[in-house]
Image: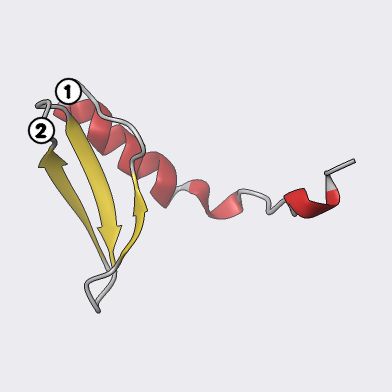
Amino acid sequence: MRYELYRDAGGQWRWRLRVQNGNVIADSGEGYMRREDCERGIALVKNSGEASIVDMTTKIA
């Protein structure tokens, strides 16, 4: 897997996580004005291993 940093058509920084077969399995979902902020977004994802999983289908009333 690898994180790819790139600029979108509007010139903002974005990232995507690509697996070995070439598929993108995650992306930033938003653009960043500064590369440093984009890299901080990658760091947040990398460190989110402790995040809980919530089944939203059980939350629908």
Within-10-Å neighbours for mark 1: few <14, some 14–19, many 20+: few
Q: Residues within 10 Å of mark 2 (few under 14, many from 20)?
A: few
Q: Work out whether residue 52 or residue 31 is closer to the camera in this orientation and state it.
A: 31
Name the residue that disc number 1 marks.
34
Residue at 24% x, 26% y is 32
Label 2 SS: loop
Q: Residue at x 25, y 33 (%)?
A: 38
Residue 46 pos. (x, y %) = 40, 51
Q: What is the basis of the colouring in this image?
A: secondary structure
Q: In which quadrant of the rendered view does residue 36 lie? A: top left
Residue 33 at x, y percent in the picture:
19, 20
Does 59 sit left or right of 47 as displayed? right
How many numbered marks are there? 2
- Residue ID for mark 2: 9
Indicate which disc, 2 or 1, sits on the residue closer to the N terminus: 2
Return the residue nearer the eye: 7 or 50.
7
The residue lying at 10 percent from left, 33 percent from top is: 9
